[in-house]
Amino acid sequence: MSIRGYGPALALAALLFTAGCSTAASSSPAAAPSPSPSATPPMVPQVGQCYDRPFGGEIMTPVVTDCVKDHQVEIAYVGSLTVSGLPAPGTPDLAPADAECRTKTAVYLGTPLGRRGLTYEIAVPAAADWNKASRWFACQLVAVDFSPGDPKLATVQGSYAAGKTAAAPRCFTLTKAHDLNPVDCAEPHSAEYVGAPSAAYAAPVPKDKDDPAFTPFQIACRDEIAAEMGVSAKKLDDTWGYNFWAANNLSKAGISVAQCYFVLWSGKTITGSVLGTQGKNIPKG
């Protein structure tokens, strides 16, 4: 087995500020009163809808958009919660919903969960909607970006429902320092972004390679790459290499995944994707 170059991803945060003011002449008619919060119907996502951002953000409310336009979220499934209080990401109350999302999202995709970064995040109602007896949960289909060591959510175009848009392969050349530089998969390359498999629900994200929490993500990546290639985990360990980065900055949203890359550490090159090859014509490396 050859695993190298593990580095924790750094969380990135942005602060958004909004300000507004309005003036009106004394002769202007009074503005119509705004509807009270209780009169505003709760937001309930629907399967197949796309949103510009995930539910659960602290600053801006997600806006539904046409799936052909830029978006970060597609709703793969909507279910019902039976818990007494509004559950937070990673808590035991959401474990049953997580189990459903693992299955339902894969069915919606029509491909293995995690392939080329497609995974899920659980959404629940905002506190104001929860207080109006809204009790849904949604499996938000999201794409974990392919940039090595920078596992943010990608902005995509098109629906990833089965039979529609397929996630594009992402390949890389390998430098002498073992950095990965993006290249078209039709060109000679030594590495490929295989996917973003999920560890167990609420699995702690490792701080470094000596952290015991490192092992579940390593195993998840090894098994993901082997399954996508069509070889055994032992064959992958004995013949080729791989690398991964745990998505530290996504864990607060309940996304316990890692970016996983097939790598020929020898520097040998191939063309095309390793997915489904059963290892044929892939040099030892």
Image (cartoon, helix red, strand yellow):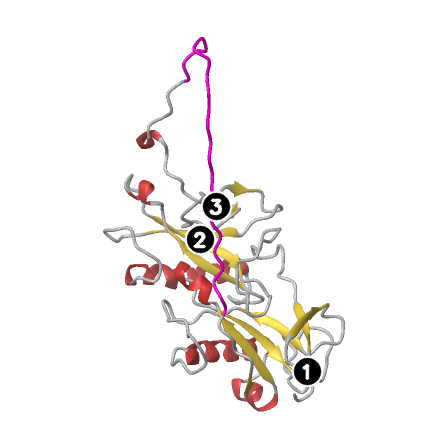
Query: Does 21 appear in magenta?
Result: yes
Q: Give residue 226's mark.
A: none
Q: Is residue 129 left or right of residue 2?
A: left
Which circle, 2 or 1, is nearer the viewer?
A: 1
N-terminal label among 2 and 1: 2
Q: Position of residue 256 (x, y in %)?
A: 43, 67
Query: Does 5 appear in magenta?
Result: no
Q: Position of residue 165 (x, y in %)?
A: 63, 56
Amino acid type, callout 3 = Leu
Which circle, 3 or 2, is nearer the viewer?
A: 3
Residue extending farthest bottom: 238
Q: Which residue is mark 1?
A: 176
Amino acid type, callout 2 = Tyr
Q: Quadrant of the C terminus?
A: bottom right
Tag 1 secondary structure: loop
Identify which residue, 243 or 125, lies in the foreground. 243
N-terminal label among 3 and 2: 3
N-terminal label among 1 and 3: 3
Q: Which residue is mark 3?
A: 16
Tag 2 secondary structure: strand
Q: Position of residue 49 (x, y in %)?
A: 51, 46
- Main SS class of the magenta portion in the image: loop
Q: Position of residue 32 (x, y in %)?
A: 40, 18
Identify which residue, 25 or 116, lies in the foreground. 25
Disc 2 packing (10 Å; few <14; some 14–19; many ≥20): many
Residue extending farthest left: 84
- CA gap, disc 2 to disc 1? 44 Å
Q: Which residue is mark 2?
A: 77
Amino acid type, callout 1 = Lys
